[in-house]
Amino acid sequence: MELSLFRTLWGVQQEMCSYVDALRQAGFVGVEARVPLELEARRTFKQSLKELDMKYIAILFSGGDVIPNQAESPDQHLARLAEQLDFAAELEPKFVNVLPGNDRWTMTQQVDFFGRAHELAKEKGVFCSFETHRATSLYSPWVTLELIRQLPEVRYTADISHWVLVCERLLNDPVDDLSRFIERVHHIQARVGYPQGPQTPHPGAPEYKEALQFHQNVWQAIWQKHLDAGRTETTMTTEFGADGYLHHLPFTNVPVADLWALNEWMAVEERAHFERFIHQHHSLLSESVL
């Protein structure tokens, strides 16, 4: 099994041609980014991906943006999703990462929405992976686990940093059994959160060692499930971003770290982590044969 690393375009303003060499040098094979809603923008983006030989993971928001319109119903979310899945298909992504629903809906509404969204994706012939994210339906591990109980066929993008913040703790208590979720994760977003925030100032800082280890334990458990399932590729997007996630110094508004450097550090760290994981797996196989 190979690890394919993607780089988020969240917070990136430059044209892709200006940084594609740096992406490759850091080990990225592609990018994860929002689907452009304007036809000409989609055509331009698709041409850039083709010319630069970059793979693509599409991002859609059923609620229109990160924070969904609070007045919209599940039917309105589904209508938008139907339209934008067609937009995404034009770009020929590996798959579509969906930020789904609204955290204010009842459990009955959540189950109905996900059941219909999953069927819609199948009708469109587009694979959708639904991301765990605050403000959406998947803001909480406990809501997600209940959805899994009722809709076991749905697949997920794991961004565990959101759940760490929502629960205000690392989910490493013995009773925090996320195994049913881990079994259904299709894709990983690698950002390290901590109990009071969705993004550490730097994941390599010693004061966040425990948080990094927790996230890596979850990611490795997902890799193991992918390996057991016979997958030849597992995907991961480094997703350190701006918009209040990146810490700034008070009064000066100066960032405490560089976004590019944070995502590059995460890529290098997880490439090494994955290689250790695969080496350990091969060693255990060799021992079992002996």
Image (cartoon, rainbow, N blue to C red):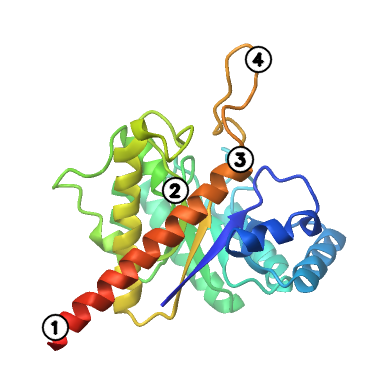
The C terminus lies in quadrant: bottom left
Whether residue 85 is situated above or below residue 111 in the rendered picture? below
Secondary structure state at the residue bearing disc 3: helix
Q: State the residue position of label 4.
A: 252
The image quarter containing residue 81 is bottom right
Disc on the earlier residue, 1 or 2? 2
What's under tag 4, amino acid-wise? Thr
Indicate the quadrant containing the N terminus: top left, top right, bottom left or bottom right: bottom left
Q: Marks 2 and 4, how far apart in space?
A: 36 Å
Which-is-in-front pick, marks 1 and 4?
Answer: 1
How crowded is the residue under tag 4: few (<14 C-alpha within 10 Å), some, or many (20+)? few
Residue assigned mark 2: 137
Say whether residue 246 is visible: yes
Q: How far apart are marks 3 and 1 (CA)?
A: 43 Å
Judged by depth in the image, the label closer to the viewer, 1 or 2, is 1
Q: Where is residue 93 in the image (x, y as percent from the top left)?
A: 64, 71
Q: Nearer the viewer, residue 243 or 26?
A: 26
Q: What residue type is labelled 1?
A: Ser
Q: Mark 3 points at which residue?
A: 259
Q: Looking at the image, tell me whether mark 1 or mark 4 is earlier in sequence order.
A: 4
Question: Mark 1 = which residue?
Answer: 288
How much space separates mark 2 and mark 3, taking CA atoms?
28 Å
- Look at discs 3 and 1 and give the one toward the viewer: 1
**Is tag 2's residue or tag 4's residue first in the polypeptide sequence?**
2
- Marks 4 and 1: in contact by CB < 8 Å? no
Drawn side of residue 67 relative to residue 223, left or right: right
- Could you say which quadrant of the image residue 106 lies in? top left
Examine the rendered structure and indicate whether residue 288 appears above or below residue 42: below
Q: Residues within 10 Å of mark 2 (few under 14, many from 20)?
A: many
Residue at 63% x, 11% y: name it: 251
Q: Nearer the viewer, mark 2 or mark 3?
A: 3
